[in-house]
Image: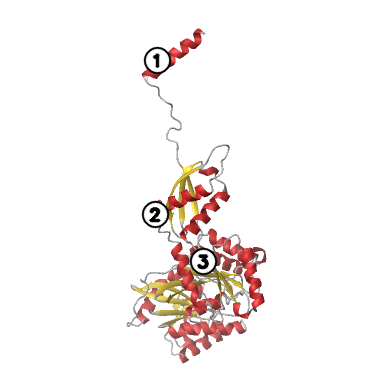
Amino acid sequence: MTVVALVGRPNVGKSTLFNRLTGTRDALVANRPGLTRDRRYGRMDIAGRNVAVVDTGGLKGDEGAMSEVVTAQAHAAIAEAALVVLLVDARDGRTATDEEIVADLRKRGAAMLLVANKIDGVPPEAAVGDFAALGLGAPLMISATQGRGMAGLRDAVADLLPDDDLPDESAAAPGPRVAVVGRPNVGKSTLFNRLLGDERQVVSDEPGTTRDAIEAPFERDGRPYVLIDTAGVRRRGRVSDFVEKFSVVKSLDAMDRADVAFVLVDAREGIVEQDLHLIGYTADAGTGVVLVVNKWDGLSAAERADVRSGLDRRLVFAPWVPVAFVSALHGSGVGSLMRTVDEVHAAGTLETSATALTEILERAVADHPPPSVGGRAVKLRYAHRAGSHPPTIVVHGNRTDALPASYVRYLENVYREALGMVGMPVRISLRTGENPYAGKRNELTRRQRLHRKRVIRRDRGR
């Protein structure tokens, strides 16, 4: 597939243009330079062709050591792009940084299209004359925020794209969506890169390096997957920066959309309260859960025993969650993670007949009958499948609204164990059968009415 890369210095509107071209709101946008750090891929339609568009971090930014890795990510996008859309700021005019970027792109032999963004309130003649010194001809004038000039930009991109396009792989059946979630600096991006076999994400010892949820399709053993790297999620009370708040929202949204989530924890710190909250949130969203203990290779035998003991103690509320011990940096234990994903994803399909589900229900009720409420028994009659991912089972009976929550959890555990649904939350939906005679009077036959009159006369005569 043809790749178009969006490049430029920080805060010229690359992420806003990315969202406009792809028709999404995937890229995080804020009025802050250096917000984008990783490569983000999307798809756009250009003259009937499916084209990949790549959002990149700002070139020649001033983020210290972080600027080097962000620039490396942008250069990787440039290397695979058939066309580089160089975005400049019409309000700021031509800058020395723009000139440096153009010189660097020329050295790399990149095909370039100059686009001037933020044209609102800027005289077109002044902008054209200012940027002519870059030697790329007159820039296309657009406003990514307002959508002005988008048709002309698409036409210009279509004219510059090569004809020998690679086959479109977008029609391939998407595989399970796997989100990598956890607290900051536990190794999410390192694991993401290790699984992809490519340095797709910026990795740093600095917490909060990843700011957006980045998706990447890949294959393992011939099966497709979509991997999602997310920003670290801290306790709500520690989140004050507005960018981090949006990053957390993106991470939570990724958990909602994923089929399976790797909840990553640092083996040196053990599992903490925030990790348990993430497991609970993921399960409530109906997403399969795999607890991944990272940095395992750096622990001694005694430390490993302490970590295992802590996991057994703190995961008592979710014994169905599988645990994997890995080193994302060195790759140990990572190879078996996708097999675990396959097991969890298969458990979420719940391809089981209503007869089998009812038999499991009958055994569960026989082993542990539901408690009576108000002196009246709660009767559970039959069950059937209602959905998958998460697997949902509908249980029919009478007075099911009075069934205690503890008994519902008992049914969830029974079904999970009976069906071998490892790593997958189970939802039980209760239905109470309606009384067909509710609100109706019992109409007496003629014989019953005559008998009733005789009884009344006899009683009055006494």
Query: Residue 433 appears at what percent x and percent y?
Result: 45, 41
Q: Residue at x 49, y 55 (%)?
A: 415
Q: Amino acid at mark 3?
A: Ala
The CA span between labels 1 and 3 is 72 Å
Closest to the observer, 380 or 161:
380
Query: Residue 138 appears at what percent x and percent y?
Result: 43, 82
**Seen in the image, is 275 located left or right of residue 173?**
right
Q: Amino acid at mark 1?
A: Leu
Q: Describe the element under mark 3 as helix, strand or loop.
A: helix
* Residue on which disc 3 sits: 254
Location of residue 280 (image quadrant): bottom right
Query: Residue 69 appears at what percent x and percent y?
Result: 56, 83
Mark 1 vs 2, N-terminal side: 2
Q: Describe the element under mark 2 as helix, strand or loop.
A: loop
Indicate which disc residue 450 carries.
Answer: 1
The CA span between labels 1 and 2 is 53 Å
Q: Is residue 151 visible?
A: yes
**Seen in the image, is 446 located left or right of residue 67?**
left
Instruction: Give yes or no for contact between labels 1 and 3 (Cβ–Cβ under 8 Å).
Output: no
Location of residue 21 (image quadrant): bottom left
* Residue on which disc 2 sits: 353
| Colouring scheme, one of rainbow, by chain, secondary structure, one colour | secondary structure
Q: Nearer the viewer, mark 1 or mark 3?
A: 1
Q: Describe the element under mark 1 as helix, strand or loop.
A: helix
